[in-house]
Image (tube, rainbow, N blue to C red):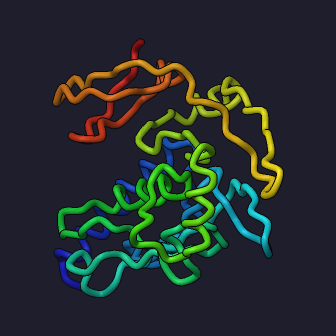
Amino acid sequence: MSTVRQDRLASDYAEIEEYARLHPRVRIVQVQGSPPERYEIEYRISSLVKSGTEVKIKKNHLVEIALPENYPGTPPEVSMLTPVFHPNIDDKSIYLEEHWTTETSLQSVVIRIGEMLAFQRYHLDSANQQDAVEWVNKHIDQIPMDEIDMHAFVQPQEEDESRESVPKPQAKTTPSLNVPIIDPIPDSVKLTCPECNSTYSVRRSADGRKVQCKKCKKIFLVKL
């Protein structure tokens, strides 16, 4: 293994390990290699599965990320270990769409997968599952399936308290598909990154938590 590749793998692992430690919905189940070349990651995010003709919400998902021999020159190979009903995910792979470069971080891939599972991110024009495209077109008012901010971090000691403080949405069902309708997004406020001055919206429930700027990646404490 080249020194450049080994250094990149070690850097990736440190970054992903820290991300999973701080984010309440992401967990590293296991890794292979030293430094790791293969990850099994659990996402605790509301997404969809299909059984026969019935579409249901499922909240736990396993994803495998394998780093090929020529990585980072070659992009990661990403696949689901558990079924998901999504326009850009099939039994073999997750279609991430964005162009991969050697500067693309593995953490950004982990974040993108979470956003896809939550139906915050999808591409109907490059779909792997056409029936999922039809479902999205008919139930656009129910998307996203989860409002979790994949960029927001929560310190481990705050995690249990934060989970208890978030109200559970009241589930409603559609007559044909029996899929809960997600409640509207809670009130949000504008947040400005102290590093790059980028502005975007965050939920009021993020007050007192650590978040990561989506542009410059600086981690800072939210004070509303």
Q: Residue at x 26, y 36 (%)?
A: 218
Residues 180 and 76: in front is 180
- Image quarter (top left, top right, bottom left or bottom right) of the C terminus: top left
User: For residue 146, which quarter of the picture?
Assistant: top right
Q: Nearer the viewer, residue 86 or 125?
A: 125
Q: Percent from the top left, x then y, of residue 82?
A: 66, 72
Q: Left of 42 or right of it: where is 170?
A: right
Residue positioned 37% across, 23% down in the render: 221
Describe residue 46's horizontal placement relative to residue 31 as left or right: right
How many dots with numbers?
0
Which of the two residues, 145 or 125, is positioned nearer the viewer here? Answer: 125
Quadrant of the snapshot with the N terminus: bottom left
Among the 4 quarters of the image, the one containing residue 54:
bottom right
Q: Residue at x 29, y 65 (%)?
A: 98
Q: Position of residue 24 (x, y in %)?
A: 57, 42
Residue 29 percent coordinates (x, y): 59, 64
- 54 with respect to 154 (left or right): right
Image position of 190 with respect to 217: above or below: above
Which residue occupies 48% across, 41% down?
Answer: 22
Q: Position of residue 176 (x, y in %)?
A: 81, 57
Q: Is 81 in front, or is 170?
A: 170
